Image (tube, rainbow, N blue to C red):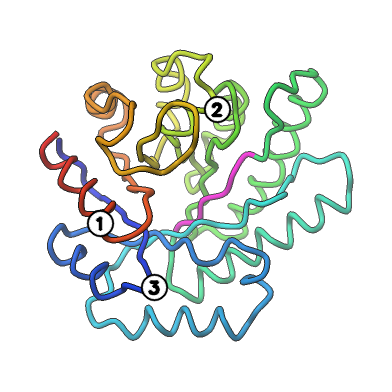
Amino acid sequence: MEIQNIYIIPDRKDLERSLFLVQEYGVHFEYNDFFLPVIMDDEKTIGEIISLYESCASLPGGNSMHGAFLDVTIHSDDPLIRKISDIRIRQSIAIAQRASVKRVVFHTGLIPGFILPSYLEGFEKKNEAYFRELCAEFPDMEILMENMFDDTPAPLAGLAAKLKDVENFGVCFDYAHAHVFGKNVPIEEWVQALAPYVKHLHINDNDLYNDSHDALGSGKIDYSKFKKYYETYFPTASVLLEVSGYEKAKCSLQYLKEL
């Protein structure tokens, strides 16, 4: 299958081989180094990581980054939680700017199974207001929201519909998360609900019960279906092979090539 832009997660401890995949397959990097609070609050470590990447002569362009997501809840009713969530999101954007990254991926932060109407309405209303303002403040940064523990696509699709006029906002559809946490909703319903807003996808394999981030083809997700969905619903979206390490990344790249 043909994908315009494929991303892998670089391994800082094995960076030479990560860069080999850049050369061999023409992939980009999606940094997964900066989402932990212990890193975000360590200016020295942040500087060292960015310097390491900048020192690579063959560093790919057009890279992406995973932003803070642990306990980040913009739609919380607690103003203190909203405040720290805003701080973490802005820290992520600041790091992205320093690392010359133009896209940051955040999570919905939804509580799965919590279907209280006021909660879901608050999710949509508060996130719409917040991300509309944030995207206007950082017009050169693409800001994406990803499904994590979401058990249905409806809240994320509803939010994305409200923000469809915001050019630098969109959906990062984690196809593997939908198979684990949203498996009570048919995968085609996930695809159709989110398709109008999907700009980026995260894919890996699993046993349909655990979010194990296995190499493509080593689990139970039917990627022949993914090929059909990709070509039909979001053929211009970029794709991250969200697996760790050189071996899983190379195996997944070869699997995609053969698919």
Q: CA distance from mark 3 to mark 1?
A: 14 Å
Image location (x, y in percent) of residue 50: 46, 79
Amino acid, disc 1: Glu
Q: Residue 180 in the image: x percent, y percent? A: 49, 28
Of tags 1 and 2, the one toward the viewer is 1
User: Which badge, 1 or 2, is on the more N-terminal residue?
Assistant: 2
Mark 1 and mark 2 residues within 8 Å of each other at the beta carbon:
no
User: Mark 3 or mark 1, which has the lower sequence index?
Assistant: 3
Q: Start and end of the magenta stretch? A: 103-108
Residue plotted at (59% across, 44% down)? 107
Q: What residue would you read off at disc 1? A: 247
Toward the viewer: 67 or 102?
Answer: 67
What residue is at 60 percent from the left and 54 percent from the top? 136
As drawn, 12 above or below 136: below
Question: Where's residue 218, x and y in %?
Answer: 28, 36
- Percent from the top left, x then y, of residue 200? 39, 42
